Amino acid sequence: MTEHSSEDLKHTPLDALHRELGAKMVGFAGYDMPVQYTGIIAEHTHTREQCGLFDVSHMGQAEITGSNPIGALESMVPGDLAALADGQMRYTMLTNDDGGILDDLMVTRRGDNLFVIVNAACKDADFAHIAAGLGDGNQLEIMPDLGLLALQGPKAAEVLGRFAPDCQAMSFMTAQPLTIGDIPCVVSRSGYSGEDGYEISVPADQAEALARLLLGEEEVMAAGLGARDSLRLEAGLCLYGSDIDETTTPIEAGLIWTISKRRRAEGGFPGASVIQEQIENGVKRKRVGILPDGKAPARAHTEVADKDGNIIGEVSSGGFGPTVGGPIAIGYVKTEFIKADTPVDLMVRGKPNPGKVVKMPFAEHHYFKG
């Protein structure tokens, strides 16, 4: 994130509302976005205890239609899309020929079509890549006229249920069309905070009205990118460009759970042979949680050393975990050091700060499974 606002930054449909609410705005993925309103720790804690409302309209939304959308997209991702029932969602990745991750994305089946949400920083490249790989008879329809809100936290179902009661029966990773305060939306029970919650796709010209409606409920607090990042870090979730990228495979990233037995066996996606070999024979490094001792955070690119001073890896994301009450980090270390409670040193400003490898998540997930 860069702390500037310039004329070349894009704006989400909630830009005026952010400023009205006193948000601190920063440049992020080409957009002017709110990093915080009242404070990152306050917004983080409120989301954990009640619910926070996040503007994620900068992300890319699109629909794939045609003769065989599922087969076409399966040729680009290792996820099992054929197994999706109508209204089910899947987290998966676009991979390259080396098994590296071009981006991670959410895919929802809507009848015979697929709806995809991709990261803001990658969306132009993602959409070009997907469109080029669809083949004859399939089309990608990009939907720039949609906003996206994330209502996250233990009170989210109660709050949204006041306007759309059917949302309360939805299970994690499902989606359906719902009307919220006379506004037609597509609601998924999903999010990137580790908490129960929803992501709401809404016509851009009605996004502000929807946000005001939800913010009018006493449990809801506006939350910015800062709290979104600390929440996902505590939840042990990957941030594209930090924890995963084109040089990282799903196996190294600990994302083997996203690849079903059928896709592992059949392949048929870019980098399949690399990923299959790694599943069979293992990898040299893996993503782990790291708990530093004391109060000093270990930021991205901090070197990780063993107790003999040998560099064994690097932090990919790190910061303060408000729920944990101290610093936390995600990083990659050599496979022989991935066991929980393995002692390590974090090289902060050239000095070794002790810590240990831990299992993730740092804060317990509270997804609603039904």
Image: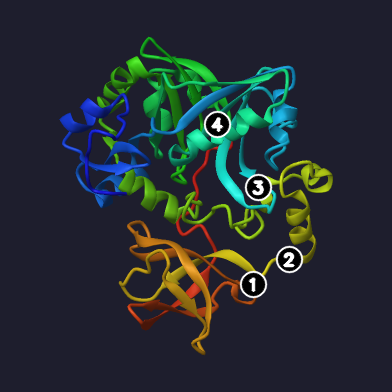
In primary-sequence order, the first of circles 4 and 3 is 3
**Which mark, residue 335?**
1
| Residue bearing mark 4 | 127
Residue 132 point in image, percent of width and height: 64, 30
Residue 146 point in image, percent of width and height: 42, 21
Residue 163 point in image, percent of width and height: 38, 18
Decide: few, some or many residues near mark 1? Use Cα within 10 Å; few <14, some 14-19, many ≥20: some
Closer to the camera in the image, 102 or 215: 102
**Which mark, residue 357?**
none
| Residue bearing mark 3 | 96
Where 287 falls versus 22 (above or below)? Answer: below
Where 4 falls versus 337 (above or below)? Answer: above
Decide: few, some or many residues near mark 4? Use Cα within 10 Å; few <14, some 14-19, many ≥20: some
In primary-sequence order, the first of circles 2 and 1 is 2
In primary-sequence order, the first of circles 3 and 1 is 3
Quadrant placement of the C terminus: top right
Closer to the camera in the image, 328 or 155: 328
Q: Amino acid at mark 1?
A: Thr
Q: Are marks 1 and 4 in contact (CB under 8 Å)?
A: no
What residue do we see at 38% from left, 49% from top? 229
Q: Amino acid at mark 2?
A: Gly
Circle 2 sits in a helix, a strand or a loop, which is it?
loop
Decide: few, some or many residues near mark 2? Use Cα within 10 Å; few <14, some 14-19, many ≥20: some
| Residue bearing mark 2 | 282
